[in-house]
Image (cartoon, grey):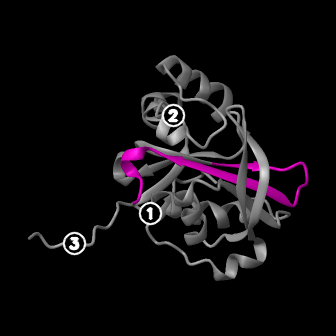
Amino acid sequence: MEQSKAVEFPLVTLRPFVLADSDALMTWASDARVTLFQRRHPLTAIDDARRYIANHILPHPFYRAICLGASGRPVGSISVQRSNEPHRASVGYRVAQDFWGRGIATAALRAVTPAVFEAWPELERLEAVADVENPASQRVLEKAGFHREGVLRKYVMLKGESRDMVMYSFLASDLSKLCSDARVNHAPGTL
């Protein structure tokens, strides 16, 4: 019988996307398992990925590639969108299915959270929603220090169906409780 060993995941780095990340983006953006709880359908062609990076990701004020180790190859993405109200923003993340269950999304969220509050001093609240049928995403948010606030019934339209969402928040006042994760780095000048 083989003994189980604790496995440490490689260093997680966040960096801006570049057009050359199209192939990497396709590994999760074309996967129906990854896009199941997202508003958009899976991408079907590499040209779609290039257009998505050029037209949506690059102009976005806070959209980062989640990379592992020294290779710099993205295995997911994390983005923060400001609200119409300057004291609020929302965060979303996605990770390629081959990398699920390794703490990668949690590490990325732990890195982005203080960085966003530092970059936007007027920000008081960072929020996220997770589908009620997506317990893995709910665990990511909880492990990253977000607080579950409740269920918002029929809150989001996903692929033509209204869905119940669990609302989570992280307040600027929660920063003192956030445990730093030494395994996460930001590429220089990226935040």
Q: x, y percentage for residue 183?
A: 43, 67
- Kindly identify which numbered label has been placed on residue 185: none
Verify CB contact (< 8 Å) between mark 1 and mark 2. Answer: no
Crowd rating for badge 2 (residues with CA inside 10 Å; few <14, some 14–19, many 20+): many
Q: Is the residue 126 above or below the residue 55 in the image? A: below
In magenta segment, residue 94? yes
Q: Closer to the N terminus: mark 1 or mark 2?
A: 2
Give the residue number, with chain letter if any, for mark 3.
5
Q: x, y percentage for residue 75?
A: 43, 45
Q: Secondary structure at mark 2?
A: helix
Residue 96 sits in which quadrant? top left
Q: Amino acid at mark 3?
A: Lys
Give the residue number, with chain letter if any, for mark 2.
29
Q: Amino acid at mark 1?
A: Gly
Q: Amino acid at mark 2?
A: Ala
Give the residue number, with chain letter if any, for mark 1.
103
Crowd rating for badge 3 (residues with CA inside 10 Å; few <14, some 14–19, many 20+): few
Left or right of 189, for residue 75? left
> From the image, which quarter does the N terminus lie in?
bottom left
For the point 49% across and 61% down, the residue is 185
Q: x, y percentage for residue 45?
A: 48, 19
Q: Secondary structure at mark 3?
A: loop
Verify CB contact (< 8 Å) between mark 2 and mark 3. Answer: no
- Identity of the residue furthest to the bottom in this view: 177
For the point 66% across and 70% down, the residue is 146
Magenta-tinted stretch: 79-101
Q: Is the residue 61 above or below the residue 100 in the image? A: above
79 and 35: which is toward the camera: 35
Q: CA distance from mark 1 to mark 2?
A: 19 Å
